[in-house]
Image (spheres, grey):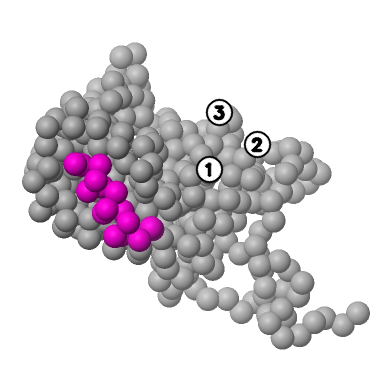
Amino acid sequence: MSSPTGAGGHDAERTVSPATLSPATLAVVAGRPARVPDAPFNEPVTFASTYNAGGVLEYGRYGNPTWSAFEEAIGALEGGQARAFASGLAAISAVLSLLPEGAVIVAPDNAYSGTRSQIDERVAAGRATVRLVAVDDSAAVAAATVGSDMVWLESPTNPNLDVADLDAAARACAAAGALLAVDNTFATPVLQRPLEHGADIVVHSATKLIAGHSDVVLGVVVTRDETLLARIDTHRRLHGAIPGPMEAWLALRGLRTLALRVERAQSNATDLAKRLTADPRVDNVRYPGFGAMVSIEVAGGADAADALAGNVRLWSHATSLGGVESSLERRRRWPSESDAVSDSLVRLSVGIEDVEDLWADLAQALG
């Protein structure tokens, strides 16, 4: 039978270099199968625990074609090589496994509570020392970096939305011989690529904006360093925190609209931040000027913040974030949340709904 012609008959050798494409385009095209006749546009889901011997996969804990497609796409977006994990916390654990015993870790004073809990567990066991810093104070970050083994940054932080100078942090880490790891979950590679600013490692909770539809739990680690990549890969093989193929496929599907979703959510967030700043029922608005996250400190303290969360109708009261739907929560309702976070702080994850509907619901709930 002759090969079909036209749109389905692209030459597999005809490719575009990722370096020439914008993040919005890479989110759509990276991680696709080769363009050969009758090939699918999307990498299929491969459900397999066992492979025939003699290839590179060997066993289901070592690799999967669906993971590989997702990893290729995230790696292209961040400018490195990626490894997917069963959750964001599993990815964080893999990065912290790079530390020697007795390591000194520099971390944000208002980092994601799951990250802080993992670091605190190491400290309690006598395996590490932690130095907490305000990441938006570059001088404090640089001073804390001296004599450290790893600087862990979030930019923006979760939930205070502080922004770090990644270039300055990378210079400080290079001088100190410390690794720089950046949690890029809030910004996403559409808005920020930490490896280009000198970071050694990037971490994502792909559960959030990358997958974007509140139906996946997944994590990712990205690096340009082959030695670090090999250690991260070995950790995944030995500790078994592997992603499910269905989760990887869903996250890759969600990734295709990442740029569009971030663009719309960011537009909504910017608008809402302006309106909330002018509202006397709000004491403080934290918005870095980009991204889908806004944090507000509600006048009246924790009780008023809880009332806001309980009175919304369109917004969802939930602890996760980054979906197409808008959600919010008072972060200090969790005992593990940092004392650097105000009791009245409500973190808003702004979605892609009509901004007037979102504002109307917030306005009535604040009242």
Span shown in magenta: 352-367
Q: Amino acid at mark 3?
A: His
Q: Is residue 353 magenta?
A: yes
For the residues marked 3 and 1, what is the alpha-carbon distance in whole angstroms? 21 Å
Instruction: Give x and y (percent) for residue 257.
Output: 48, 62
Identify the element where label 3 is drawn.
helix
Identify the element where label 1 is drawn.
loop
Residue at figure coordinates x 36%, y 43% from the top left: 313
Q: Earlier in the sequence, mark 3 or mark 1?
A: 1
Q: Amino acid at mark 2?
A: Arg
Identify the element where label 2 is drawn.
loop
* Numbered tag placed on residue 163 in the rendering: none
Query: Taking 196 as reference, is 43 left or right?
Result: right
Query: Taking 73 as reference, is 175 left or right?
Result: left
- The residue that label 1 is drawn on is 216
For the residues marked 2 and 3, what is the alpha-carbon distance in whole angstroms? 10 Å
